[in-house]
Amino acid sequence: MTVTDPDLGVEDQQLSLSRAAARNLATTTKSAPQMQGISPRWLLRSLPWVEAKGGAFRVNRRLSFAIGDGRVTFTSVGHEVRIVPQELAEFVLLRGFEDEAALTAVANHFEQREYEPGDVIAERGQPVDEIIVIAHGKVGRTGRGEYGDEVALGTMADGEYLGDEPVLSGADKKWTFTARALTPTTAVVLSRAAFRQLADQVDPLREHIAQQLAHPTNPANKHGEAEIHIASGHDGEPPLPHTFVDYELRPREYELSVAQTILRVHTRVADLYSQPMDQVEHQLRLTIEALRERQEYELVNNKEFGLIANADLKQRISTKSGPVTPDDMDELISRRRNTKLILAHPKAIAAFGRQLSSRGLYSPTTDVEGQQLQTWRGIPIAPCDKIPVNKNGTTSILAMRLGEEKQGVVGLRQTGIPDEYEPGLNVRFMGIDEHAVLKYLVSTYYSAAILVPDALGVLENVEIGL
């Protein structure tokens, strides 16, 4: 072909077919549609899935006498914090006491105190003459070891308390440990003298405590479950105890939750532009990926069944300093048998790696489904970006036992549903509307259950900053 433009010289003549024209006759090599929001979704991959026929799953447990969650709740106005009066029933000797006027009077007698890091809140060997409730902050407890050395006894955080039984009962006891603020800490304190004066004026309060002291709660094991009486180590033919295993009268039921969306594809697109790639198929694939991401988010964060919100508060611990250390990880996994998975935000895993490097330690990796995961004590640490990072730069780390046979954490779903596309997920054709648009209802049904409280532990207040 000769170029007719007179301004072009011989050197500017086009000697071959242009690329723009050639592409009209060529089939472009292309990728399938990509999606940046796809994550590894280790929680969905690791959970053992249990069939929830009827859309619900009931968790039957032994009868437990534990009442409350073990932490006191506060309200705040500016810098002032106040105990919610009904939360005082968390104290052992006030359990079952429902006189709101008396509880409000007790709550009003608490005084707020502020502590700086290093300040002593309670000192070993001194009389227990105050109830101390941590409103905000982190407190470390230390005691005397067998050989006179100082040993760490753990940390306390928001809502935990000290000294309630000796002060309420009037018993003369001394602190067996020293409690010291690790961070700026706000606490509310009720003195023994203030409570005695109040109890003398409020007859129902005094009578309730006297009854609790005279008739202790039903015998229970260290987990709060009703005791099973057993005789052992005896000789001869003594009378054997009679017993039975009691169950909870109102066991918890987990109903399957749902994530849904309506996928719309124009018939013109489906008819004319589905070669070499099926447009409906790829639209559906990316929609399912988004639903699975939402499913994992809900399993972590949902208030009704999410792992973080439903972890037993007695299975929650705080880091000893700020960043997660090997000591913190050991404390976390030691609280349950047969821990199979640790779940952490990628930034928390990086922070843990920095702590290991600073101590000259190395965490080996293991192969899980063809991918290398960091481990601690042989337990895989899987990344999960659905675990929230708070505004103050802290997050949580979850450790769990898995499987129904291990009394662990399980995922719930129902398979065999109509128009099932994947296990627990279906795609239902809804027809074509007046705009010639195909519509598909895409739904996934799921939930999660913690079979016994110690199946899941949470390490809180994990700082991820450099």
Image: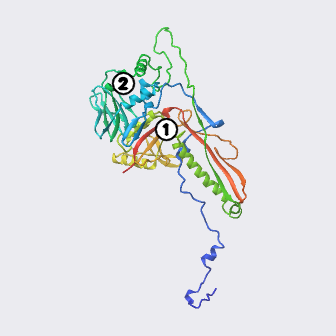
Q: Are marks 2 and 1 in contact (CB under 8 Å)?
A: no
Question: Which residue shows up at 51% across the image and 40% down it?
Answer: 307
In the image: residue 336, left or right of residue 415: left
Q: Nearer the viewer, mark 2 or mark 1?
A: 2
In terms of secondary structure, where does tag 1 sit? strand
Between 209 and 386, the one nearer to me in the picture: 209
Secondary structure of residue under mark 2: helix
Q: CA distance from mark 2 to mark 1?
A: 45 Å
Measured as percent of width and height from the top left, residue 39 is found at 53, 51
Residue shown at 57% from the left, 25% from the top = 249
Residue type at mark 2 is Leu
Q: Determine the residue located farthest toward the top in the rendered image.
A: 237
In x, y percent, where is residue 243? 53, 16
Left or right of 174 on screen, residue 289: right
Q: Residues within 10 Å of mark 2 (few under 14, many from 20)?
A: some
Residue that label 1 marks = 400
From the image, tell me which residue sits under label 2. Answer: 198
* Label 1 neighbour load within 10 Å: few <14, some 14-19, many 20+: many
The residue located at (57%, 28%) in the rendering is 250
What residue type is disc 1 on? Met
Residue 84, disc: none
Describe residue 45's horizontal placement relative to residue 351 as left or right: right
Q: With respect to residue 405, does 433 lie above or below?
A: below
> Upstream in the sequence, badge 2 or badge 1?
2
Residue 43 x, y percent position in the rendering: 53, 44
Residue 461 % position (x, y)? 40, 42
- On screen, residue 136 versus residue 148, left or right, reads right
Placement of the N terminus among the 4 image quadrants: bottom right
